[in-house]
Image: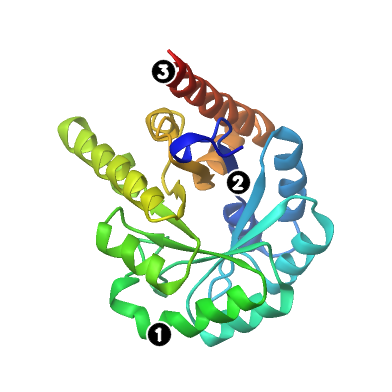
Amino acid sequence: MLGQNGFTEYLRLGVNIDHVATIRNARGGHHPDPLRAAHMAAKAGADGITAHLREDRRHMTDGDIERLIGEVDLTLNLEMAATDEMLKVALAHSPHAACIVPEKRAERTTEGGLDAAGGLNHLMPIIGALNAKGIRVSLFIEADPRQLEAAKLLGAPVVELHTGAYCDSVGTAQAQELIRIQEAAAYGAELGLEIHAGHGLGFDTVALIAEIPQLAELNVGHFLVGEAIFGGLDSAIKRMRSLMDNARAVVSAERTA
């Protein structure tokens, strides 16, 4: 529940199941099934499912998206590029949310935030169409005031702050990245945006991010699927959920002390 100054006691966890589909696609066929992973995530404590339908369909397929919407009770956050093709898919399936991300065919994974400020004219009609359909729009952006202001101008109610640089850094550099994310979350909340975060988060990096009071949701995927190889998806999600809850409890205690 939303509290004073944008603080929520409960931090939602969105589980990205793209790389379950990546493993399946390595050999073709139907195993492992992303739909099964989504059901397991729901039982383990996930609040939503994230899936990226890429132009080249290297992860999820159109059929995967249709099944996820039709057969999983959790909300679906469809990650998508800002293209006419992906807009058509989103409007046809009406997922709960659509997160617009930058996409390059040659990249292994999303390499950084969307340049919302530099793409206002291109993004405006796409966001408008999604909003009109009742699909909650989020923009995956860097922790940059200029990008936050652009998201507000574009009418996107949600932003997801890119945490990749924070997770890849150590020492002083990581501390600086954390401050940058903290300041962006606070500024975004002042603008009236709902603030999410994600990319690269793992057991060792999630706690300090989860302590940022303005955050409403974290999205975690590749790390959880990787951990599932060693200890199971259920175990990995439950541990991530516990780390997030513990971090949130620390913030709550500090605010009421």
Furthest residue in direction left, as rendered: 172
Q: Residue 38, position in %: x, y?
A: 72, 48
Q: CA distance from mark 1 to mark 2?
A: 29 Å
Mark 3 falls on what kind of element? helix
In the displayed structure image, the side of residue 55 where residue 186 appears, left or right:
left
**Reading the chain from its start, which is encountered first: label 1 or label 2?**
2
Which residue appears at 71% of the width and 33% of the height?
44
Query: Residue 68, which numbered label?
Result: none
Which residue appears at 28% of the width and 77% of the height?
118
Label 3 environment density (alpha carbons within 10 Å; few <14, some 14–19, many ≥20): few
Say which of 9 and 105 sits in front.
9
Residue with the mark numbered 2: 15
Which residue appears at 53% of the width and 35% of the height?
3
Say which of 81 and 191 sits in front.
191
- Is the C terminus in the top left, top right, bottom left or bottom right quadrant? top left
Residue with the mark numbered 1: 122
Tell me which amino acid carries mark 3: Glu
